Image (cartoon, helix red, strand yellow):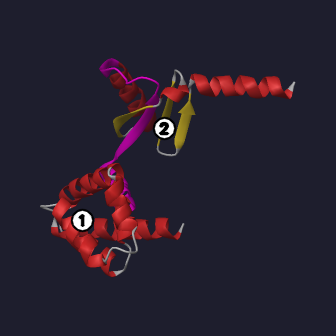
Amino acid sequence: MAGERAAYRYAKAAFSLSKDEKATEAVNGDMATIYKTVDSHKDLKNMLYSPVVKSQDKKAVLFRVFTDLHKTTVNTIDVMITNNRIYLLADVAKRFTALYDEFKGTQTAKVTTAVPLSEELKVQVLTKVKELTAKEVEVENVVDPSIIGGFILRVGDVQYDASIANKLNKLKREFSLN
């Protein structure tokens, strides 16, 4: 809980600074890359969380992995290292991107399906979500075979579960009550 608040505060400060420097787009690109990289590389994530690895070694690794970062991103990493909060880097990057999307008036619709969405379905989902939210929307497709069929749509805090697994669970609960 405290880590989430701290990550939000770092992201908010970095976003505010990037707005002042008119570099929100560049810093958002950095943050998106940082989030994807740290989230997808377990060793990098473990290194950031490790109390055994010295802060300066973490910094050296980060700047070797992430080259050509904007100075605001570099300063954010430096402050996080100084405050021993570098383990929050992926969370800060994710929250920064959310702040950027909110600033730009865009939103991400996360569609979970059992099989990858076709381009035609992606366009249909995009059109429907734009109607509902009146914002620019990007569609992110997550494939999860455990939902069996159907889809789960999540836009912001709203989730619509039309998966076969959900319907089967509802039936199971109904039969177990009788």
Q: In the rendered image, is residue 96 in sight?
A: no
The residue to which callout 1 is attached is: 19
Of mark 2 and mark 1, the one earlier in the sequence is: 1
> Is disc 2 in contact with disc 1, using a CB cutoff of under 8 Å?
no
Name the residue at the right extreme. Answer: 178
Q: How many neighbours does mark 1 have within 10 angstroms: few (below 14), some (14-19), or many (20 or more)?
A: some
Q: Amino acid at mark 1?
A: Lys
Image location (x, y in percent) of residue 25: 20, 55
Residue 152 higher or lower than 16, as above or below: above
Give the residues drawn in magenta, as a range: 91-120
Image location (x, y in percent) of residue 87: 38, 67
Q: Nearer the viewer, mark 2 or mark 1?
A: 2
Q: CA distance from mark 2 to mark 1?
A: 28 Å
Nearer-the-camera pick, 161 or 178: 178
At 48% from the left edge and 65% from the top edge, which residue is drawn? 4
**Residue 95 sits inside the magenta stretch:** yes
At 52% from the left edge and 46% from the top edge, which residue is drawn? 157
Name the residue at the bottom extreme. Answer: 82
Q: Amino acid at mark 2?
A: Arg
Please state if 104 lies on the left or on the right of 125 as rendered: left
Name the residue at the left extreme. Answer: 68
Displayed quadrant of residue 142: top left
Please state if 152 lies on the left or on the right of 119 as rendered: right
The residue to which callout 2 is attached is: 154
Image quarter where the C terminus lies is top right
Please state if 89 lies on the left or on the right of 158 as rendered: left
At 41% from the left edge and 66% from the top edge, which residue is drawn? 7
Q: Secondary structure at mark 2?
A: strand
Image location (x, y in percent) of residue 120: 32, 18
Q: Secondary structure at mark 1?
A: helix
Image quarter where the N terminus lies is bottom right
